[in-house]
């Protein structure tokens, strides 16, 4: 019984840790950094942490030839997903953005039906209806205001890119043969390459201006990345994938709480209800055993670096 309790607590910590993304990223924007710079340093600082863990566990660093291209693809997908999410923080409440991102499991479920002929179930249709209602509430705020359409499109692009990441992890035998910590190490390495490649295209590399900025960057690399991964993996080993993924609903909750308490952003009752509907729809999908393989296997491989 104690072991199960420990597993649930680890799953909750993993989810809450990932929800800290906005709390550390937004202050960096206020000091002049852009999303590409923030993510470059986040990934870069996360690489040596993972390298130390790999060395301590005796995990070899070498990749076989047939593993290079798949890890590169995953690194590109994850880095672009992260970039779209972090860019959306500039246009909308970061807590709401994190909630909208939580539609990715439903995207996975739908794509698995159309691309890989998964059996369609009534629960998927129900979740789509509930999610649509939640999105409608979020898109039409009180007092005639509306969310930034551009910000919403960025979040949807982030969710869609991450959904492709999940599907590839789920269907690729080559990727499944790579240890979790090693896969994450190379995903971060390839991500750094992507962010460097974007510099000549107009994404200026901005160095941290203050000592506190370095703290936020290190926190981004450690808390929502390495800590979240470690806790998620351990929780799956103790209580399994489904409970761990369901407790992942705490991610948008923690993001919203920190956005209000730390960043001073406001959230209306309408937005809270909309967020609850989206989280509810996603939880139903995750709890459906017929779709579990597609959505939940990635929780062990990569806990939403949703590095987002």
Image (cartoon, grey):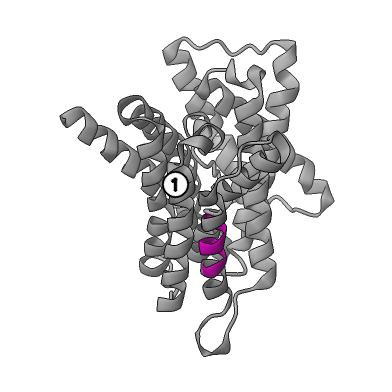
Residue 102 appears in the picture as rendered: yes
Q: Quadrant of residue 147?
A: bottom right
Q: Which residues are magenta?
A: 127-133
Residue name at image x 71 percent, y 25 percent: 70
Q: Quadrant of residue 267?
A: bottom left
Residue name at image x 33 percent, y 43 percent: 13
Q: Is residue 278 above or below residue 288?
A: below
Say which of 44 and 260 sits in front: 260
Q: Which residue is mark 1?
A: 18
Residue name at image x 38 percent, y 41 percent: 14
Q: Position of residue 124 (x, y in %)?
A: 55, 50
Q: Is residue 182 above or below residue 21?
A: above
Say which of 40 and 83 sits in front: 83
Q: Is residue 117 above or below residue 179?
A: below
Say which of 252 and 53 sits in front: 252
Reply yes or no: does residue 128 show up in magenta. Answer: yes
Quadrant for the N terminus in the image = top left
Q: Residue furthest bottom?
A: 143
Q: Residues within 10 Å of mark 1 (few under 14, many from 20)?
A: many
- Residue 245 left/right relative to 103: left
Reply yes or no: does residue 132 show up in magenta. Answer: yes
Q: Quadrant of residue 57?
A: top left
Q: Which SS class for mark 1?
A: helix
Q: Position of residue 308 (x, y in %)?
A: 56, 48
Q: Position of residue 118 (x, y in %)?
A: 63, 36
Q: Position of residue 167 (x, y in %)?
A: 64, 35
- Residue 180 left/right relative to 77: left
- Residue 293 left/right relative to 35: left
């Amino acid at each position: 019984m104690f072991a199960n309790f420990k597993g649930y607590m680890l799953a909750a910590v993993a989810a809450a840790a990932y929800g800290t993304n906005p709390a550390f990223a937004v202050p960096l924007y206020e000091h002049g950094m852009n999303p590409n710079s923030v993510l470059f340093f986040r990934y870069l600082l996360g690489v040596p942490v993972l390298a130390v863990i790999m060395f301590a566990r005796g995990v070899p660093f070498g990749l076989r030839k047939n593993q290079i291209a798949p890890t590169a693809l995953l690194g590109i997908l994850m880095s672009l997903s992260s970039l779209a999410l972090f860019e959306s923080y500039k246009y909308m409440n970061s807590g709401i953005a994190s909630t909208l991102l939580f539609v990715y499991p439903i995207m996975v479920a739908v794509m698995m039906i159309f691309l890989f002929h998964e059996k369609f179930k009534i629960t998927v249709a129900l979740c789509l209806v509930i999610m649509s209602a939640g999105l409608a509430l979020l898109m039409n705020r009180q007092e005639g205001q509306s969310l930034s359409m551009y910000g919403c499109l960025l979040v949807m692009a982030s969710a869609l890119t991450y959904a492709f990441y999940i599907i590839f992890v789920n269907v690729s035998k080559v990727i499944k043969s790579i240890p979790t910590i090693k896969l994450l190490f190379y995903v971060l390495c390839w991500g750094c390459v992507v962010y460097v490649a974007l510099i000549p295209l107009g994404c200026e590399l901005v160095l941290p201006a203050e000592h506190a900025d370095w703290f936020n960057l290190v926190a981004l690399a450690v808390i929502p990345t390495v800590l979240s991964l470690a806790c998620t993996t351990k929780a799956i080993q103790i209580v399994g994938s489904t409970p761990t993924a369901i407790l992942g609903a705490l991610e948008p909750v923690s993001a919203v709480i920190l956005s209000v308490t730390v960043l001073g952003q406001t959230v209306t009752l309408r937005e809270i209800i909309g967020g609850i509907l989206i989280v509810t729809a996603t939880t139903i999908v995750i709890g459906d055993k017929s779709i579990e393989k597609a959505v939940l296997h990635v929780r062990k491989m990569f806990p939403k670096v949703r590095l987002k």
